[in-house]
Amino acid sequence: MPCHCRSAVRVCSPVIPAGLRVALQTPLPFGSAEDVRAEVKHLIRTLAVDGTGYIVAPCHNLQNITPLKNIVALYEAAHEYGRLG
């Protein structure tokens, strides 16, 4: 996945927490629960690495075709990988 996450952290940090979101096109509606977990883990490990924070959220809104298991995976992964310290 092409992502300029590290550039965003350099520009924004430490002024504001990174606000990049988990993509709606993929993996949320079309990927597996493991794809969603991997995306969340990648974003947290990339954007919260300096301890300034990262807001885990889907972009815009959840599409009605998004499987419930993927929504649950998003928030479970945020809870599992999103602890600072």
Image (cartoon, rainbow, N blue to C red):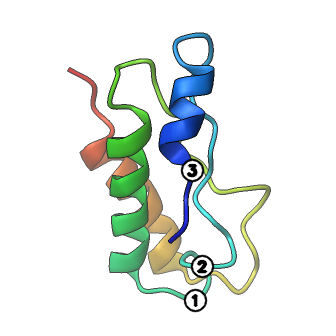
Question: Residue type at mark 2?
Answer: Thr
Relative to residue 56, is residue 29 drawn left or right? right
Residue, x 32% and y 31% (percent of image)? 49
Query: How far is disc 1 from disc 2 in space, using C-alphas?
Result: 6 Å
Along the viewing direction, whichever of 77 and 68 lies nearer the viewer:
77
- Count of marks overlaid on the render: 3
Find residue 50 and report its image quarter: top left
Question: Disc 1 marks which amino acid?
Answer: Phe
| Picture coordinates of residue 19, whole percent (x, y) | 63, 37
Q: What element carries label 3?
A: loop
Q: Mark 3 points at which residue?
A: 4
Q: Find numbered disc 1 in the image and state the secondary structure of the residue it sits on.
A: loop
- 4 versus 27 height, above or below: above
Q: Quadrant of residue 30?
A: bottom right
Mark 2 or 3 closer to N-term?
3
Kind of residue at disc 3? His
Task: Report x, y in % for residue 18.
Answer: 58, 32
Q: Do the CB atoms of the residues marked 1 and 2 lie less than 8 Å apart?
A: yes
Residue holding disc 1: 30
Count neighbours of disc 3 (C-alpha within 10 A) and say few if under 14, some if 14 to 19, many if 20 or more: few
